[in-house]
Image: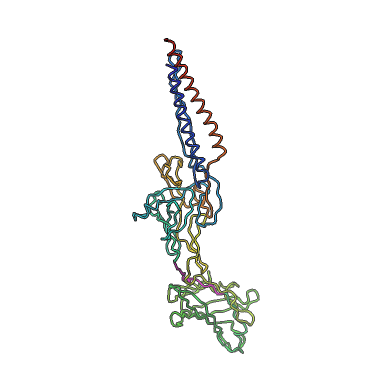
Amino acid sequence: MSISSSLNAGVAGLGANATRLAAISDNIANSATFGYKRVETDFQSLVIGSNGGNYSAGGVRSTTQRNIDQHGSLVTTSNATDLAVRGRGMLPVARSSEVGVGNGAGQMMLTTTGSFRTDAEGVLKTGSGLVLLGWPAGPDGTVPTFPRDTSDGLEPVRINVNQQTGEPTTQISLGVNLPATETGAASSGDPQQLSVEYFDNLGKSENILVEFTPTIPGTGSSNEWTMTFKDSAQGNAVIGDYTLTFDASRASGGTLLNVTTNSGGAYDPATGKIITTVAGGPMEIDIGQTGALDGLTQLSDSFAPLSISKDGSPVGNMTAVEVDENGFVHASFDTGITRIVYQVPLVDLPNPNGMVAFDNQTYLPSPASGSFFLWDAGDGPTGDVVSFAREESATDVAEELTNMIQTQRAYSSNAKVIQTVDEMLQETTNIKR
């Protein structure tokens, strides 16, 4: 009977609008929750059809969908390890309870934002117990190649705030002017000395003594020097000996004309560099190319170390940690050096809305979401990582309140239908009196 179907349709309407109200209340309750993705309710009609001249109401049913691909606005914070994803992609995390069991990094879950801070063991995790996952870098700061279609290789990002580190010196550049007057026949021939500090493999300070001895001719000027390198770590043993000849022409006066290797690593005129060996291993010393003014020169009457530069650093303590836009975790030390210790990838899926939602704004890939892939942040379809930032809730309170008014009216109307059907059924029962 069609009047009975009206009653069923009214009951279905009450249920569908109750579901919509539940989604609205959840959205409003989480309007201040960082990273929250709003839930949307859709209605679909159920059509039973008609039989002859009678029509039977099919009613309505509701479905809910969490819009995981919708992003809220980013807000700045004062914590360097507050992270948010700007654009497509999600951060890999795991529950700290699973990580604490010791069975590896735990099951990989995904989120778009988090306020990560170090715990007692130096692990970056949120107050709700989500641990940030990343690929560990090697001692030289480079990240090895890991598989991209699986979470194997990801591990909790652990920051050892008590860590000390130093970098050995592997390259020295010498910008020194030698006095042209010292290569004349009347000169004393006294050597010019320069001590350059370097740091060995254990962070200790050592020195390379560079000695320049002029060649004194019988008449005129030789424009020639003998350069020797001595290593303090080897008891001032000579590790290189070279004869330097400088150009006296008008066009290139004062620049290197020729370098003859007497002992030690050979001079490369194409790069202007010498590879010699100190106690800790090879050392690259840049004295400049022939014909150039950026290395060793011979001008005027003064010995002047104009530019001495080198890499490496003494042992220092970690002072800060930051994450750059490409997901690299940088540890800064009080010696001024910065080293990459982890890389946090961004995870992308064909259908983010197909993931399974869990507590704390985390999501788990599912067959409906498709296979995931781990990208370098800023590469492929993914966006970048923003530090000192959180993602706000995707809820628009004004829109939700408007939807609540519509839902309330629809619910009342369906209740009125049920009341009307009840009155009509009452009239039907009153026919027999």
Q: Is residue 403 left or right of residue 93?
A: right
Q: Report the coloring of the rendering.
A: rainbow
Task: Please identify the quadrant where the C terminus is shown.
Answer: top left
Estimate the x, y position of residue 190 in percent, counting from the top left.
Answer: 56, 87
Residue 143 belongs to magenta span: no
Estimate the x, y position of residue 386 in percent, counting from the top left.
Answer: 53, 53
Estimate the x, y position of residue 235 in percent, counting from the top left.
Answer: 44, 83
Does 357 appear above or below 186? above
Task: Please identify the quadrant where the N terminus is shown.
Answer: top left
Residue 171 belongs to magenta span: yes
* Residue drawn where x is 45% and y is 59% of the image: 118
Does 403 appear above or below 279? above
Q: Which residues are magenta?
A: 163-174
Q: How many marks?
A: 0
Q: Nearer the viewer, residue 135 or 77?
A: 77
Q: Is residue 212 left or right of residue 353?
A: right
Does 333 appear above or below 106? below
